[in-house]
Amino acid sequence: MATLLRIEVGLDVQAASQQGPIQARAIDPSRKAFALRNHILDWQSCVSAISSCQKPVIALMHGYAYGAAIDLSTACDIRFCASNTIFCVKETDIGLAADVGTLARLPKVLGGLTSFAKEVALSARPFSADEALKQGFVSRVLSSKEELVAEGLKLAQLIASKSPVAVQGTKNVLDYAWGRTVEENNNYVAVWNAGMLQSTDVERAMTSGLQKRKPTFEKL
């Protein structure tokens, strides 16, 4: 019921500089622009597939998390990292504005268009695990990659032990809430739960709590 995504990735700058639509010769600028736009949209759809996953996605980050690693991690629901992780929104160093999701999602992850968000995006300066934790980019920093994976699995197992109706509903309502008023979100969750409270999971969870036993739920 929860998905783990271990991230240690970045752009292959050498390959990107030698091939692809940026280097392609087109009949005219408009056709080259169409090719570039379609190329960017394809990349965006790959990253957005993570954020549109109905199940919670946990990112486990270690080593160098540059460029595409930031794109991927901001599309996840929860982010943990190892203490040696170095992060970087690298795109201004390679002559472009990040276009696969970082500039859209990073401010939401950080709680707004903060000074920190603009600083790291504009300067392309690396930042540490401790700084990522302080700014709310990650929720936990673990001492090693091994501890990182163990804690990520532990959290995934805990989430997976809950009602899948409740877990996926909670993610859906939280994602809907961003940028909307409390009244709008309350109305949305009222309509959502009008259907979801009819699940047998509610009775199972309540009964197991009273009986002090672990509940079991059917898969969605």
Image: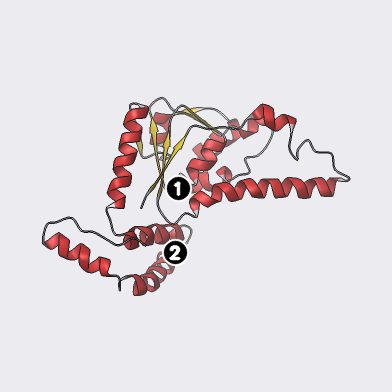
- Badge 1 crowding class, 10 Å Cα cut-off, few under 14, some 14 to 19, many 20 or more, is some
Count of numbered badges drawn on the protein: 2
Residue at the spot 68% in from the left edge and 30% down from the top edge: 15
Relative image position of residue 30 (x, y in whole percent):
83, 49
Location of residue 159 with respect to 127 vertically, above or below: below
What's the distance in space between the residues labelled 2 and 1, CA to CA? 15 Å
Residue at the spot 73% in from the left edge and 37% down from the top edge: 20
Location of residue 173 with respect to 100 vertically, above or below: below
Q: Secondary structure at mark 2?
A: loop
Relative image position of residue 174 (x, y in whole percent):
40, 58
Q: Which residue is mark 1?
A: 111
Q: Is residue 169 left or right of residue 178?
A: left
Q: Which residue is mark 2?
A: 181
Q: Secondary structure at mark 1?
A: loop
> Which quadrant holds residue 83?
top left
| Residue 179 vs residue 61, the one in the foreground | 61
